[in-house]
Image (tube, rainbow, N blue to C red):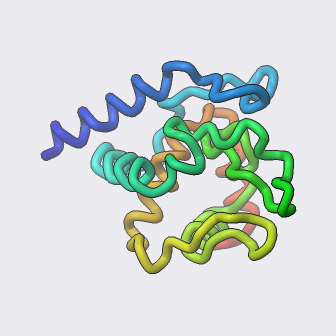
Amino acid sequence: MVLKALLVVLTAVVLGGCDRGGGAGTQPPGKAASPAAQPAADAETLALGARVYARNCARCHGPRAEGDFQWRRRTPEGRYRPPPLDGTGHAWHHPLDVLRRVIREGGPPGQSDMPAWGDRLSPQEIDAVIAWFQSRWPPEIRQAWERRNAASGRPR
């Protein structure tokens, strides 16, 4: 089982390293994302996160967590498009409790089409998917997030 989980994680890392472009505007200048940057969890948790992400998140946020290439532009209905979760978007600005809440309860009504997943995902699955997309963040983004999260005074 552990070998299978490790193979899933390694496959995700290798495939995630291919074609990081994801479309115009997804990669800020000078911010090359690294799929193996400081994983926040063990191989089993990352494998669970990769499975949960592939089943539930990839349709909107992209298979490599690259998000919609126009994520900063609102739709004609005034909602924001799915942002990247690979460290090139704004997810790293939010403390862990906010990331959990957005996944559990969905995005702000009228501002986002992000559905609530709290009735479909367990707290363990939510934490695993967060660990998975955080494992794709470059080291400097991960460190900045850790500082922000600690400064928020919110529980980890």
Whether residue 156 is visible to the viewer of this picture, yes or no, is no
In the image, farthest residue toward the left: 1
**Which residue ends up furthest to the bottom in the rendered image?**
119
Of 151 and 136, the residue lying toward us: 136
Q: Residue at x 67, y 72 (%)?
A: 154
Q: Is residue 89 above or below residue 111?
A: above
Relative to 90, residue 86 above or below: above
- The residue sitting at 64% across, 23% down in the picture is 21
Q: Is residue 108 left or right of residue 99?
A: right
Q: Is residue 103 visible?
A: yes
How far across and how far down the image is residue 123, in percent? Answer: 42, 72
Query: Is 137 in front, or is 114?
Result: 114
Figure quadrant of residue 33: top right
In the picture, residue 97 is in which quadrant?
bottom right
Give the position of the C terminus as an image quadrant.
bottom right
Give the number of callouts: 0
In the displayed structure image, the side of residue 78 where residue 87 appears, left or right: left
Residue 147 place in picture, x, y as percent: 71, 51
Residue 125, compared with residue 68, is above or below; it is: below
Q: Residue at x 41, y 74 (%)?
A: 120
Q: Is residue 122 above or below residue 16?
A: below
Q: Nearer the viewer, residue 59 or 32?
A: 59
